[in-house]
Amino acid sequence: MKSALMLTLGALLLTGIAQARQEPAAKSPDALPEVKASRAAAQQFGGALKEALQQAVQNGGPVNGIAVCHDKAEQIAADQSQKSGFLIGRTSLKTRNPANAPDNWELAVLRQFEARKAQGEPADKLEFFAVIDDDKGQKTFRYMKAIPTAALCLNCHGETLSSEVAAKIKELYPNDQAHGFKEGDLRGAFTIAKPLP
């Protein structure tokens, strides 16, 4: 997904982000089918992932939850992508899995989310969409929805981790950056893309 959707010029990024919220000038964002479908896809992916995590933690504690993110999250994303027709994933400014590192467009949107949150917007309301040209000139619809840090997330992403959790994270993700969060922090975002005809 990342290589197919790497973006064009930095200048386009800056102007595109400034203008993208107004891009559908004639329509409310709620009237755009891609936005509605993206919201539904993000909600379904988030719900499926949360359910798998909750079950894993109930059955074997937080270390078991790490296994869900490591072993099952990618498959859940692939299943949701197939159902929705979108490319679905997660990304963050502080990644655990390097495969989830943001591309340039995602990085700019994540920074925008942090700025908007700092100005008082609730993290669970942050979303952004735009139609951009990918690196091959393909018009692509892009959507991101912020993921606030929930209490469940703190077991593996919080400021203080148990020694067992910390050891498992170090084993699976030696370059982990995704820790030190507090409840309500911006953990990352769901990222959705769909090439347009």
Image (spheres, rainbow, N blue to C red):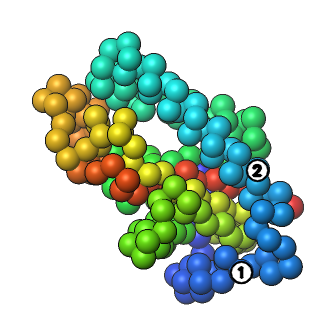
Horizontal side of 190 relative to 56 (left or right) equals: right
State the residue lying farthest toward the left: 163
The answer to which quarter of the image holds residue 145 is bottom right
Q: Nearer the viewer, residue 190 or 183?
A: 183
**Quadrant in the picture for residue 58:** top left
Position above or below: 123 against 108: above
Can you tell which mark lies on residue 22? 1
Residue drawn 25% across the image and 44% down it? 158
Q: Is residue 91 visible?
A: no
User: Residue at horizontal 39%, vertical 48%?
Assistant: 149
How packed mark 1 is, by other alpha carbons closer than 10 Å (few <14, some 14-19, many 20 or more), is: some
Judged left or right of residue 52, residue 161 is: left
Q: Is residue 130 visible?
A: yes
* Amino acid bearing label 1: Gln
Q: Nearer the viewer, residue 130 or 25?
A: 25
Q: In what element is the residue under mark 2?
A: helix
Residue position for label 2: 37
Residue 159, x across and y down, in percent: 20, 47
Query: In the displayed structure, would residue 162 be above or below residue 189?
Result: above
- Indicate which disc, 1 or 2, sits on the residue closer to the N terminus: 1
Amino acid type of the residue that numbered disc 2 sits on in the rendered structure = Ala
